[in-house]
Amino acid sequence: MTRTARELLETITRELAPDPRSNPLVPLIARGEADRDTLAALALEQSWVIPADRRAFRHLADRSADQPRAAAYFTALAEGEELAARRLEAFAAACGVDRERAASYTPLPGCQAYPAYVAWLALNAAPADAVLAVSANFSAWGGYCATIAEALRTHYGFTAEARAFFDLFAEPSPGPDRAAAEAVQDGLDTGRLDEGLARGYGHLLQSYESLFWRTLLRPV
């Protein structure tokens, strides 16, 4: 029996779900045991990730001109990154990051491997394959953000404004989820989706996601 896009998305998301041991930092934050310098590093690394991802998603949208559903999905992601960038400022300020500190910060290679690979996908992956890989990865990211948002409230005393960056990704997103399913379905219907390649892309994305968090705890 032919699977639907939603069934495929659910299957790959489940297959690629990270081992809890692959992210030692978020549990520390959840217990209030991560120091402010580590939170500041998280904010600073995200200040590099977000604009890179935004440009990558815009490029994927441009490459999807003949696939309007994929184009709509990546356009929505790029717009979401713009909103995330604005919300990140309050979190960074709450962590003690000012303009001088941000300007002098050198990003960590282990953290920037993730956006570098998203950029690789933007240049090389078929749009439908990239939709499937990116969507599967976002499930883990959203869960991490939900945990961090709650910890910032209960253990660190951050204001709602300072937590808003993480709330953005933690909240259910029926619009992007629906757009992803439509784009994947279009890829299945037109034969433009390669499940094997998409799985490989998703596996690498999830691996780089885990590397991001491990690097913040033990910089490499």
Image: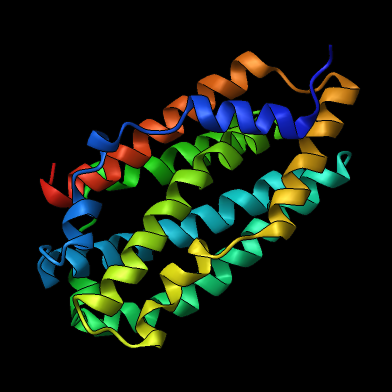
- Residue 64 shows up from this direction: no
Q: Position of residue 153 (x, y in %)?
A: 30, 78
Vertical position of residue 61 compared to residue 94: above or below: above
Q: Position of residue 4 (x, y in %)?
A: 81, 27
147 in relation to 205, above or below:
below
**Looking at the image, which residue is at 36% across and 31% down?**
207
Residue plotted at (41% across, 34% down): 206
Counting from the top left corner in percent of width and height, residue 198 is at 61, 24
Q: Nearer the viewer, residue 159 or 44?
A: 159
State which quarter of the image contains the N terminus: top right
Nearer to me, 171 or 105: 171
Q: Is residue 12 left or right of residue 158?
A: right
Total numbered labels placed on residues in the image:
0
Placement of 93 over or under 46, stated as above or below: below
Q: Is residue 126 left or right of residue 122?
A: right
Q: Nearer the viewer, residue 114 or 151?
A: 151
Q: Residue at x 66, y 48 (%)?
A: 59
Front-lying residue, 191 or 105: 191
> In the rendered image, which quarter is residue 33 located in?
bottom left
Quadrant (top left, top right, bottom left, bottom right) of the C terminus? top left
Query: x, y percentage for residue 106?
Result: 20, 59
Q: From where the camera sits, is residue 42 visible? A: yes
- Tell me the quarter of the picture where residue 133 sits: top right
- Above or below, 188 against 1 in this view is below
